[in-house]
Amino acid sequence: MSVVINDTCITCDACLQQCPVNAIVDDAANPTGKKQYYVQPDKCVECVDIYADPQCAAICPSIGCITWDMPFTKEFDEHFKNEEIYKLGVNKEGIVRSPAYKEKKFRTDIPLEIRGIGKEVQEEPEELQEVG
Ligand code: SF4
Ligand code: SF4
């Protein structure tokens, strides 16, 4: 990854079943302690090779709730280890599952300029935008 679920999550549960790699956990299992669903960045593959778009964002009813973050690659190891919106798991040997441990697939067609905490995956549908 990854994509990020922010605090506009209404805990509707729609995304959890939709994720093809079981990367999403519910608010009760969110390792950061926040009362919102959580994408495990070390599991999310941005739906690469499975779907054309992130399926969590496609089904989420809360516009702007799911945003692009940086690719889960070694280049961004410190980002995923240090940002407080993440709490990475550890393996059996106690090694943090950061990108340096194992990188994940990401959408190469999504440029870095539109990635980062707060960059929306899902655009507001035209029919919901104000006219005039
Ligand atoms: S982008 Fe795809 S793989 Fe990542 S959390 Fe969303 S549904 Fe799962
Ligand atoms: S679909 Fe959106 S609002 Fe519903 S639980 Fe997932 S992130 Fe939260």
Image (cartoon, rainbow, N blue to C red):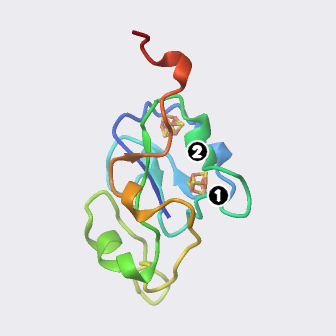
Q: Which residue lies at the image location 34% right of the left edge and 62% below the top edge? A: 86
Q: Quadrant of residue 65?
A: top left
Q: Is residue 104 left or right of residue 30?
A: right
| Other residues around mark 1 within 10 Å, as few (<14) / some (14–19) / many (≥20) | many
| Callout 1 touching callout 2 (CB < 8 Å) | no
Residue that carries the numbered disc 1 in the rendered image: 47
Mark 1 sits near ligand 1, with its Cβ under 8 Å away: yes
Residue 14 picture location, percent across and down:
60, 35
Task: Name the element at disc 1.
Answer: loop
Q: Quadrant of the C terminus?
A: top left
Residue that carries the numbered disc 2 in the rendered image: 56
* Residue lying farthest to the top in this orientation: 132
Q: Which residue lies at the image location 41% right of the left edge and 64% below the top edge? A: 112
Above or below 74: residue 64: above
Q: Which residue lies at the image location 49% right of the left edge and 35% below the top edge? A: 123
Residue toward you, 80 or 37: 80
Above or below 127: residue 44: below
Residue 10 picture location, percent across and down:
44, 30
Residue toward you, 54 or 19: 54
Mark 2 sits near ligand 1, with its Cβ under 8 Å away: yes
Residue type pointed to by label 2 = Cys
* Residue lying farthest to the bottom in this orientation: 93
Above or below 14: residue 80: below
Q: Quadrant of residue 56?
A: top right
Residue 82 picture location, percent across and down:
25, 71
Residue 92 picture location, percent across and down:
50, 85
